[in-house]
Amino acid sequence: MLYRTPELGERELEVLGLIDDLAQKLRLRLHEPHRWFGSLRRSQFARAVQGSNSIEGYEAAVDDAAAIGLGEEPLDADEETRLAIKGYCDAMTYVLQLSSEPNFHYGEQLLRSLHFMMTSYNLKLRPGLWRTGDIYVRNDESGEIVYEGADIDDVSSLMHELALELNAENDCPLIVRAGMAHLNLVMIHPFKDGNGRMARCLQTLVMARNGVLSPVFCSIEEYLGSNTPAYYDVLAGVGKGAWNPSGDATEWVRFILTAHLRQARTLQIRIKESERLWGDLERLVEQNRLPDRTISPLFDAAMRYRIRNATYRAILNQSDEQITEQVAGRDLKQLTDKGLLTAHGSARGRFYTATPLLAALRQAIINERDPQDDSDPFAIAS
C-alpha cells in the first residue's frame, strides 16, 4: 500500500486552475523562438540542479552548477560536490530526453538507472541498487532519529507498486500525481543514499511527460532548495516518524501546489526580464561594434555568473556555434577593453565578471520589478 492521493477540495482545485493558467501563458511565451531562450533555459537548469543538491549539503554557486552542466570544471566546488552535481546533471539530462520518448514506460529499472547516474561516483552508496537493511534519517544537530523508512522486506514490492501506479491511467491532476510520486519514493526510502534527490528528479520526470512546459521550466527543485526547512517540516508532518501510508497527505499536496504557483510566478518575472536584458545587450553590443555572439557571455555576467574562456565556448557550442580558444580569448579581451567585463586571475584560472556599467543594466530592470505575490494560497483554508 502506498500513500493515497487525498481528495481535492475547492481551494486545491482553484489553485490548480491558477497554476494551469500560468503554465499556458508561460508556454506561449516560450514556444516562439527567442535568442534569450537558451540563456534562460541554461540558468533554470543550473538553479534546479543547485537547489536539489543544496538540500543534501552539496553547496555550489549557480555559475559552478552551470559550468558542471556544460561539462566544464567549477571554480569553487570541491571534488565530492562536483561529482554529486555532475551525477545529478546526467540524470536530469536523461529526464529531458525521456520527456518526449513515445514508448516510455515507468519501471523499477528506470528508477534504479537514474539513481546510478546520480551516485555512481561512490560505490559505497550502492548506486542503482535497493538498500539491504533498515534505514533511519537523523537530525544532524541532535543525532535523534526523525524518520524510519519502509521495512526492507517491503521495498521491492512497494517500488513495483509505485511504477504500476505511474503507468496506470487516471484523472488525477498531473501536478498532484507528480507530487505523490515524490512523497511515496522519499517515504519508502528505497536507496542507501540519494533518496531525496531521486524523489525530486522523479517528480520532474512525471511533470515533464505532460509536455505543457519543458522539464527545465516545470521543475520546483529551485523552490525546494530555497525553502528547505519548510520542505522538511511538511514531510515530517506527513510521515510522523515512520512509513505510514495510511496517513493524510493533504498538507503535502498543498505544499506542492504552493511551490508550483510561486515558482511559476518567479519564472514569469524572469522571462520578462530576460527579454528586456537581452534587448539592452543587443544595443550595447551594436554600439560597441562587438560580435553578436558576445551577447551570451554578457548576459551571464549581468546575471552575476563568472565567465571563463571554456564556459564561453561551451555556451556557444550548445547553440551550434563553435569558436576556438584563441577567438574566445580575443572576444573576452575586447569586452574587458570596452569596460564591460573585469578580468580576475591568470592563465587557466582566469575568469571575468560584470563591471558596474554592465551590472547597472540588470539592476535598472530589477528596480522596476513589480512585487511578487508570495502569499499563502491556502491561508484561508488552514
Image (cartoon, helix red, strand yellow):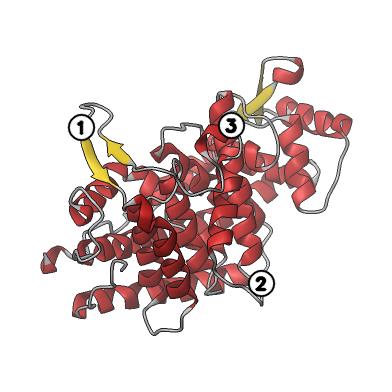
| Front position among marks 3 and 1 | 1
- Give how far across and how far down residue 57 sits, in percent: 41, 32
Mark 3 Cα-neighbour bin, 10 Å: few <14, some 14–19, many ≥20: many
The kind of residue on which mark 1 rests is: Glu
Foreground pick, 255 / 366:
255
Residue ID at (45%, 45%): 131
Q: For the N terminus, which image quadrant?
A: bottom left
Residue ID at (53%, 30%): 81
Residue ID at (46%, 31%): 59
| Front position among marks 2 and 1 | 1
Mark found first going from the N terminus, 2 or 1: 2
Foreground pick, 308 / 119:
119
Foreground pick, 98 / 330:
98
The residue at which mark 1 appears reads as 144
The residue at which mark 2 appears reads as 101
The image quarter in which residue 347 lies: top right
The residue at which mark 3 appears reads as 82
Mark found first going from the N terminus, 3 or 2: 3
Eyeballing the image, is 312 above or below 112? above
Instruction: Report the Cα–Cα distance between label 2 and label 1.
Output: 44 Å
Mark 2 Cα-neighbour bin, 10 Å: few <14, some 14–19, many ≥20: few
- Give how far across and how far down residue 91 sits, in percent: 59, 51
State left or right for residue 241 relative to residue 277. Answer: left
State left or right for residue 262 relative to residue 299. Answer: left
Pointer 3 and pointer 2: residues touching (CB < 8 Å)?
no
| Disc 3 element | helix
State left or right for residue 249 relative to residue 218. Answer: left
State left or right for residue 86 relative to residue 177. Answer: right
- Give how far across and how far down residue 13 sits, in percent: 27, 79
- Give how far across and how far down residue 269 sits, in percent: 44, 57
Pick out the residue farthest to the top: 346
